[in-house]
Amino acid sequence: MSTAFRWPVRVFYEDTDTAGIVYYANYLKFFERARTEWLRAAGINQRELSDTAQRAFVVTHSTIDYHAPARLDDQLELTVLVEKLGRASVNFRQQAWLNSPSDAPKLICSAFVRVGCVDTVTLRPAPLPADVADRLRR
């Protein structure tokens, strides 16, 4: 994919710490949801992939940078961009942008995430099925 996939997220009370700021680990959850919706938009059903092709995606590496806080009720836009599609892995660049009605979007969090494809029986690395790789290239 040459353009970023975008997914909106509202910050709920459960996402925040006692100061009303998004708890740092929750950005990983936000990014996971965005990748899942990106797969769904590409026509890839993860349950079906597991049941029929015995393949699943697992995060093997992540690096995250926090630039500014998000708070309760903020509207965020998450982006997903494929940096590299390998035989059995996908490298993603992901970002969380704060959308404000009065200001330009502000980058608040960015991450690099590597996802590996594994065989669901052995949990060993396995090649992406050809049809899945084709959909991810679009």
Image (cartoon, rainbow, N blue to C red):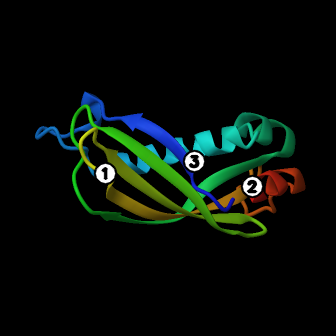
CB atoms of marks 3 and 2 within 8 Å? no
User: Mark 3 sits on what residue?
Assistant: 35
Q: Residue furthest front?
A: 102
Residue 100 image position (x, y, % from top left): 28, 42
Q: Earlier in the sequence, mark 2 or mark 1?
A: 1
Q: Residue at x 45, y 38 (%)?
A: 8
Which quadrant holds residue 81?
Answer: bottom right
Q: Nearer the viewer, residue 46 or 2?
A: 2
The secondary element bearing badge 1 is classed as loop
State how far apart marks 1 and 3 are (Cα): 24 Å
Q: Badge 1, how many Cα within 10 Å: few under 14, some, many 20+? A: few
Disc 2: which residue:
136
Image coordinates for residue 25, horizontal then vertical, percent: 33, 50
Q: Secondary structure at mark 2?
A: helix
**Residue at mark 1:** 104
Q: Is residue 64 left or right of residue 46?
A: left
Quadrant of the image occupied by residue 90: bottom right
Marks 2 and 1 close (CB-CB < 8 Å): no
**For the residue carrying disc 3, how many other residues have a C-alpha within 10 Å: few (<14), some (14-19), or many (20+)?**
many
> Which of marks 3 and 1 precedes in the sequence?
3
Q: In the rendered structure, which amino acid carries the disc numbered 2?
A: Leu
Q: Which is nearer the N-term, disc 3 or disc 2?
A: 3
Residue 122 visible in the displayed image:
no
Q: Residue, x 39% and y 62% (percent of image)?
A: 110
The amino acid pointed to by label 1 is Ala
